[in-house]
Image (cartoon, rainbow, N blue to C red):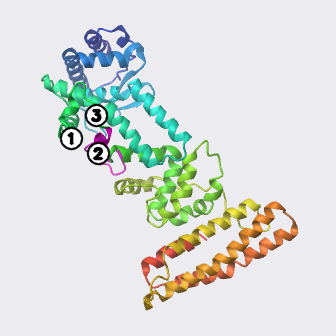
Amino acid sequence: MCQEAFLEVLGTQVNSKELLAANLQVPTGLNQGQQQELENFHNLLGEGLGALPQLKEHFETIFAGGKIKISFTTDPGDARIVGDTIVLPLVAKNGQPRAAKDIVDALIFESCNADPEVQEKNAELDEEFSSKRNMTLEEYGIKKAGIEAKRTVLKAAKFAKKLQDGGIEIAEQGNRNIQAILDLDPHFFDENATPDEAQLLTLMAGTPHQHGVTDPTDPQQLNSGDMYHYEKVVALGNVTMTGIIIAAITNKTSDIQDWVRNSGELAQGDRKKLPMIFTLIVEALDSCRLGNFAGLKFSPAMVAVAKANAPNLTIPPCPVQPVTDPSKAKPRELEVLLNGQLRILQELTNLNLGAGFSPAKKNERVAHAKIDQMRKPVQTAVGLVEQLAKKDDEKNRTLVVNAMKAIADPKKNLGDAIAQIVDPTVKDKCQKLFDQL
């Protein structure tokens, strides 16, 4: 069916000249199957618009004046909003042709996403996330999923149920959404129902954002909260931030040593521009490196997606390079280096080395004592650096250089002690931390 015929179907059913200005784009060169499916889509949509006044009114609101456009594409993928355009693929991500009922379902769902109220809520959330450093990525994902649950999923499901009740065929995805909401609370479909957002989030937490995803690298297999959390991590730093996180998750510690070592300096960067990147580096990487993902709040499913993406990403060089010559370093650089060492020594202490009195713990107790021995010269050096920052003269700098040289012996002793630890798990954790000193 040609573009003019499709516009005629919509224009007749919606009875709105504004909708005709939607600047709908239909690709050329469609094969016979795609042409037939588009014609089926046009007929099914026209039937639905004619049978359901609420859907007709909704479309008039969304597409009035060409504010939102519709574009079909033969590129495989998912329906989505790009700028001011709803993109509707005629081919699924797995390469299979998309049926007419699936395209209708996608158009209705994305038109609910395009609702000005939804867009406004999402913009407010992004602004809140950017301006408040106390909102975690996990909280962002949950709030984003909450907006979608109440204003998109439920609204689209209501349209789908009314179409179904009117004898019009709907997509399997629509059927699943309807059944899930019926199982949760049938009253959600009442005309004047006030849904409990917490209940809807519970529903979405137990189901994937998109069913049938087989690609292990695709975050849409996650529930909506996890998916938006994961995608925000990717969006914040693109390949850079995701690469660092995946390096931590996959224990590629050598790839992120400079990032961890210099996280204090990175945290002094432009927080207004990318606040959560610095927060993520400072608060999460050390724990991630030890296999503890609490800092990132990554669920096991999110970790699996991150690991699946690992081969596609590389770790960029840290923008802050480590101090190699204390006699030439700036006081701030020395402070960052020494505070990083204190932080790692504290993590080593937190491993509870030396706890208990069994013979098997003897080497752990020795390592624990060596940690304390190293902490003292580092703390001394930190105090001298503070003096150097106040007055950078030859005397103070000589004291700092000598103090930092004095750290070498305790560090060697600690390394030797860690090498003697019997428990392989404890030894591995200690060695990974020691490698960061």
Q: Which mark is residue 184?
A: 1
Which percent across, then down, holds residue 309?
41, 53
Q: Is residue 401 above or below residue 296?
A: below
User: Is residue 435 positioned above or below 94 on the image?
Assistant: below
411 up-or-down from 42: above or below: below
- Dot 3: within a 10 Å radius of its alpha carbon, few (fewer than 14), some, or many (20 or more) residues? some
The kind of residue on which mark 3 rests is Pro
Considering only order in the chain, which callout, 2 or 3, is on the residue closer to the N terminus?
3
**Residue 141, picture quadrant:** top left
Q: How many marks?
A: 3
| Res 257 → quadrant | bottom right
- Element under label 2? helix
Name the residue type under label 2: Thr
Q: Give the label on residue 377, or none.
A: none
Q: Residue at x 54, y 86 (%)?
A: 366
Spot the residue most to the left: 167
Measuring 44% from the left and 24% from the top, which residue is drawn there? 84
For label 1, count other residues whose C-alpha is less than 10 Å away and answer few (under 14), some (14-19) or many (20+): some
Could you say whether the residue bearing mark 3 is in a helix, strand or loop? loop
Query: Magenta includes 422?
Result: no
Q: Which residue is found at the position 47% from the left and 65% from the top? A: 251
Label disc, if present, on residue 195 of the rendered structure? 3
| Residue interval drawn in magenta | 197-221
Judging by the rendered image, the residue that carries numbered circle 2 is 202
Q: Residue furthest right?
A: 394
Q: Choose the circle earlier in sequence order: 2 or 1.
A: 1
Q: In this picture, is 272 found above or below 72?
A: below
Proximity of marks 2 and 1: CB atoms separated by less than 8 Å? yes
The kind of residue on which mark 1 rests is Leu
